Image: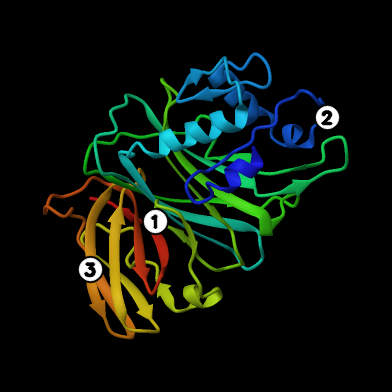
């Protein structure tokens, strides 16, 4: 299976959940047994091996290699209604991974209960026998095993800024962030995206059509700076300062905590140096927004920064 999946890298996001059998001391299972058991319960897995495709149990596999290749080819031939754009970077001290991603509905999802999961896996990790070495082993769910419920219609775009801690048991060089949107009722996976963490404090980018690394290392983050808005909290207008070390295209936007775009404050070319934008608590249509927490994000020079603000009427 691993050999076959290797031929589809960049098109699939494999996640291998280790259950409590055949080894009841499996360290992968023992590390995060609750979220693994949640997946077992979701799929009603009674035994192993157990194969499901788009929520349907496959009883007669026959030639496994032929079946898996044919299944992957047929699924990849069907256009997805969603696109996932993913960026991430690790803190310099290798304590946390910061993940920024967008879920874009290019067509109607056509499902009743879509949810987002972020699954942390390791490309490869080896334990002593009898467990041995495994690829794509599941480590954790962010924000939790129940996923994050969303509502999407054609044309909608949701933005999220999440992070997870790099546990000491992880191998940072093997960490993979997997984002997938799944219907909680039918179990159909609508779209998935995987990106390996390559290097510290650098950005790894994916555009939903395949994995890719964005070069630059720490320089990508050092070349842009985003300040805390002031005043904060605010009730009239607030100012957001940012700095660019190189001229280029810039976008500064405000989002709800659920990831919905509220307003775009800057979208265009900016010269090198320090700049400032103001937000008056109104959306792109000029309507006043409600009091609460909002997030703002700067995209520039191949990287991004985000901040948190509080609006009080």
* Residue holding disc 2: 25
In which quadrant of the rendered view does residue 24 lie? top right
Q: Nearer the viewer, mark 2 or mark 3?
A: 2
Q: Residue furthest left?
A: 286
The answer to whether 236 is drawn above or below residue 61 in the figure is below
Considering only order in the chain, which callout, 3 or 1, is on the residue closer to the N terminus?
Answer: 1
Mark 2: secondary structure:
loop
Marks 1 and 2, Cα distance to the nearest angstrom?
A: 39 Å
Mark 3: secondary structure:
strand
In which quadrant of the rendered view does residue 241 lie? bottom left
Q: On the rendered structure, is 268 left or right of 167? A: left
Residue 310 coordinates in the image, percent (x, y): 34, 54
Q: On the rendered structure, is 24 left or right of 49? A: right
Residue drawn at 33 percent across, 42 percent down: 82
Mark number for residue 267?
A: 3
Residue drawn at 52 percent across, 57 percent down: 98
Mark 1: secondary structure:
loop
Q: Residues within 10 Å of mark 1 (few under 14, many from 20)?
A: some
Q: Quadrant of the N terminus?
A: top right
Residue 15 coordinates in the image, percent (x, y): 59, 38
Looking at this view, is 195 or 38 the one in front? 195
* Residue holding disc 1: 207
Residue 109 coordinates in the image, percent (x, y): 29, 33
Q: On the rendered structure, is 153 left or right of 309? A: left
Residue 187 coordinates in the image, percent (x, y): 45, 24
Q: Residues within 10 Å of mark 3 (few under 14, many from 20)?
A: few
The answer to whether 43 is drawn above or below residue 170 in the figure is above
Q: Nearer the viewer, mark 1 or mark 2?
A: 1
Residue drawn at 32 percent across, 39 percent down: 79
Considering only order in the chain, which callout, 3 or 2, is on the residue closer to the N terminus?
Answer: 2
Residue 5 seen = yes
Marks 2 and 3, Cα distance to the nearest angstrom?
A: 53 Å
């Amino acid at each position: 299976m691993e050999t076959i999946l290797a031929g589809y890298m960049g098109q699939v996001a494999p996640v291998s959940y280790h259950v409590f059998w055949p080894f009841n001391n499996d360290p992968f299972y023992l590390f995060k047994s609750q979220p693994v058991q949640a997946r077992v319960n979701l799929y009603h897995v009674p035994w192993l091996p157990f194969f499901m495709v788009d929520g349907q149990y496959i009883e007669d596999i026959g030639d496994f290699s032929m079946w898996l290749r044919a299944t992957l080819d047929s699924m990849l031939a069907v256009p997805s209604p969603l696109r996932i754009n993913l960026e991430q970077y690790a803190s310099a001290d290798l304590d946390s991974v910061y993940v920024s991603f967008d879920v874009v509905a290019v067509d109607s999802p056509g499902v009743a209960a879509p949810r987002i999961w972020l699954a942390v896996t390791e490309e490869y990790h080896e334990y002593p026998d009898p467990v041995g070495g495994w690829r794509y082993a599941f480590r954790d769910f962010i924000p939790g095993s129940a996923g994050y419920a969303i509502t999407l219609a054609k044309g909608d775009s949701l933005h999220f800024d999440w992070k997870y801690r790099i546990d000491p048991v992880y191998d940072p060089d093997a960490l993979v962030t997997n984002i997938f949107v799944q219907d909680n009722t039918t179990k159909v996976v609508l779209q998935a995206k995987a990106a390996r963490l390559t290097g510290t404090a650098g950005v790894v980018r994916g555009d939903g059509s395949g994995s890719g690394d964005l070069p630059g290392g720490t320089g990508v983050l050092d070349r842009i700076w985003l300040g805390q808005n002031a005043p904060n909290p605010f009730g009239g207008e607030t100012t957001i300062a940012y700095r660019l070390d190189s001229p280029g295209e810039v976008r500064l936007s405000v989002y709800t905590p659920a990831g919905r775009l509220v307003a775009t404050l800057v979208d265009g070319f900016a010269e090198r140096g320090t700049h400032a934008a103001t937000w008056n608590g109104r959306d792109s249509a000029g309507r006043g927004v409600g009091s609460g927490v909002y997030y703002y994000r700067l995209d520039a020079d191949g990287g991004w920064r985000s901040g948190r603000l509080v609006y009080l009427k």
